[in-house]
Structures are given as C-alpha cells and as structure tokens.
Image: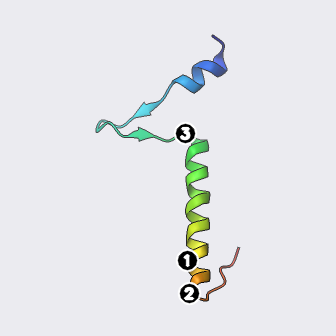
Amino acid sequence: MDELDLENLMRYFTLEGQLIPTPEEDAQQAQQRAEQLAAQLKALGIEPEV
C-alpha cells in the first residue's frame, strides 16, 4: 500500500468520537456554507460582495 492509500485511510477523531474533517473537507464545507449564506442574503434582497 503506498503513501497515498495510507493518507486516505487515516482519520482523526475527537475524544468525544466526532470525526475531524480533512483540510479538503473543511474547505468544501466552508465553500458550501458561504454559498448558502449568499443565497439567503440574495433572498432578502441583499447582494453579497464576493
């Protein structure tokens, strides 16, 4: 198994058992949240600055 495969298998959890997102997952979640907030602002008639 090469290093890339091991990287995909290793995941970290908090002491409470919650999965810690990878940097890529974290960035994707942040992007999705930003898009959701922008859509909410547009629904209120506010044009968000990008």
Question: In the picture shown, does residue 6 fall above or below 34?
Answer: above
Number of residues whose C-alpha sits closer than 10 Å to that of mark 2, classed few (under 14), some (14–19) or many (20 or more): few
Residue in the picture at 59% in, 65% down: 34
> Is 39 positioned to the left or the right of 11 in the image?
right
The three-letter code of the residue at mark 2 reads Leu
Residue in the picture at 60% in, 50% down: 27
Front: mark 1 or 3: 1
Contact check, label 1 and label 2, Cβ < 8 Å = yes
Viewer-proximal residue, 14 or 44?
Answer: 44
In which quadrant of the rendered view does residue 17 lie?
top left
The three-letter code of the residue at mark 3 reads Thr
Residue lying furthest bottom = 45
Number of residues whose C-alpha sits closer than 10 Å to that of mark 1, classed few (under 14), some (14–19) or many (20 or more): some
SS assignment at label 3: loop
Residue 46 screen position, x and y as percent: 62, 87
Task: Read off the residue under disc 2.
Answer: 44
In which quadrant of the rendered view does residue 19 lie?
top left
Viewer-proximal residue, 47 or 39?
Answer: 39
Mark 1 → mark 2, Cα distance in angstroms? 6 Å
Residue 6 screen position, x and y as percent: 58, 19
Of labels 2 and 3, earlier in sequence is 3
The three-letter code of the residue at mark 1 reads Gln
The C terminus appears in which quarter of the rendering?
bottom right
Task: Read off the residue under disc 1.
Answer: 40
Residue 12 screen position, x and y as percent: 44, 32
Residue in the picture at 55% in, 62% down: 33
Number of residues whose C-alpha sits closer than 10 Å to that of mark 3, classed few (under 14), some (14–19) or many (20 or more): few
Task: Read off the residue under disc 3.
Answer: 22
Residue 45 screen position, x and y as percent: 61, 89
Mark 2 → mark 3, Cα distance in angstroms? 33 Å
SS assignment at label 1: helix
Mark 1 → mark 3, Cα distance in angstroms? 27 Å
